[in-house]
Amino acid sequence: MEIIIGIVIGLVVGAGGVFGIIQVAAGNTVKRAKEQAEQIKTSAEKDALSKAKEIELTASTEQLKLRQKLERDQEQNVRKLDEQEQRLGKREELFDRKIDTLTVKERSLDDLDKKLLRRVKDLDERDAETAKMQADERQRLQEISGLNHDQAKQILLTRLEEDCQSECGEIVRRVVEQTHDEAKEKSRQIILTAIQRYAADQTSEHTVSSVIIPDDAMKGRVIGREGRNIRSFEKTTGVDVIIDDTPGVVTVSCFDPVRREIARISLEKLVQDGRIHPARIEEIVTEVTKEMEENLVKIGKDACVEANLPNLPKAILPMLGRLFYRTSYGQNVLKHSLEVAYLCQVMAAELGLDANLARRAGFLHDIGKAMDHEQEGGHPLIGKEFLKKFGEAEAVLNAAEGHHGDVPPTTPYTPLVMAADAISASRPGARRESLERYVKRLQDLEQVAMNFEGVRQAYAIQAGREIRVIVDAKMIDDKISAKIARDIAKKIESELTYPGEIKVTLIREVRSIEYAR
């Protein structure tokens, strides 16, 4: 127990000593901290004073710079003001001089006005004197000539008309030559380019309207007992069947080419089948009619693809197919429409117009020929009314109605279609023409030229593409010749119908004959 107490006392004493030591150490630490704090405070105060002096020095420097800048700006402004004052002074002097000059001019103008007024007054007096003198001279001339004013005026106008007619012929000739010189080469290039870039068959065959019959016995079966088969066939198809003595051939005649084609195909099928009676005839004709309607749509689609116009309304397709069976002077109308479409496209591209619209107008210009067998009126108006139902553009409608000159063109595409139509119709071999129509057209051409005064002879040459007119050299001079040639061309345009163009060549020959004896 005493040992424990001793240990405890020892521990207490030790702890007290340690505490004393710690307290002494802490006191030293605090003292050092205070010293360091004083040193830091002293250093901070020195730094603050130094920074304040630097800031004050910087501010003084900036203030000095600003003052110097302001002084420089003020000096510049003063110089500018001085310069402006000098310029204003010079302008003021200039204005003063101009005012003086204007004052002088104003005085001069006043003097001129007075002089002009005096001169006008003098001129009025002279005009009055002149008018009086003219009246006296006119009265004296009437007394001398024995003509009144109206008679003298009529004589003068007659002479003036003769002189003007001569000058008019010269002007017409000069203007035509100048126009030809400027436009002939360009138009030739455009048309030749269009023709050369399109290659087509020269002659289209006529639609075949005959059926081969193997023997005369089959002819009898086609006719039927007391003609009942042929009557039933004609009634069902709407065509005329001509059976004559020609061996092995039966002719189908109808104004509608589609109906004629249906009848031809139906008759061929009946001949091949051999069973020919009214019921079979109606069955075959109904079947062929349905096939023909499908075939017309297919032909129309193929033509649209060839013309690169795939977006045409469906109702137009069978009408295009009908054109395939329609011919004009032996030229297939659908092939003609495709040719016109391509020519219009080429010429429109050369002229900077819309080639697609030109191709569409050329392709559809003859669409009325597919319906002119069923409707009254010419095919231009029928085609225009048909296309109008489908909202076609004005250029297409005007081209369909005006490509034969029935109405004036409202767009530049109508003359293109007219030119392409003439090119397609007039190229060699494009169309056939009967001998009677050909001779009649040549005679009409010659007769038109012979009706003009002073024409001695007229000859239509080059298949009616040119007419040579020979005039009397004693009645017609060179200046009047140009006018007569132009008048003949205008009369041909107004009175005759023809494809393409006709060249009028007027010839004035002077012959000098002498005899040596």
Image (cartoon, grey):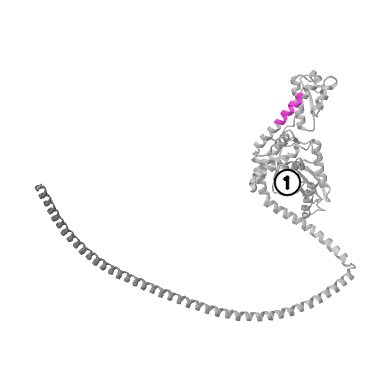
Residue 288 painted magenta: yes
Point out residue 68 in the picture as x, y percentages from the top left corner: 38, 74
Is residue 243 visible in the rendered image? The answer is no
Determine the image quadrant of residue 128: bottom right
Q: Residue at x 86, y 65 (%)?
A: 152
Asked if residue 99 is positioned above or below residue 505 in the image, the reply reads below
Write down the region rendered in magenta. Answer: 283-294
Point out residue 332 in the picture as x, y percentages from the top left corner: 72, 35
Task: State the SS at label 1.
Answer: helix
Of 11 and 87, the residue lying toward us:
11
Of 477 and 79, the residue lying toward us:
79
61 to the left or right of 401: left
91 to the left or right of 75: right
Residue 97 painted magenta: no
Of 190 and 141, the residue lying toward us:
190
Point out residue 494 in the picture as x, y percentages from the top left corner: 80, 47
Determine the image quadrant of residue 156: bottom right
Asked if residue 233 is positioned above or below residue 88 in the image, the reply reads above
Point out residue 26 in the picture as x, y percentages from the top left corner: 18, 59
- Count the marks: how many? 1
The residue under label 1 is 398
- Which amino acid type corresponds to the residue marked 1 in the rendered image? Asn
Q: What secondary structure predominates along the stretch shown in magenta?
A: helix
Is residue 421 visible in the rendered image? The answer is yes
- How crowded pointer 1 is (Cα within 10 Å; few <14, some 14-19, many 20+) is rated as many
- Considering every residue shown, the one lying at the far top of the view is 217
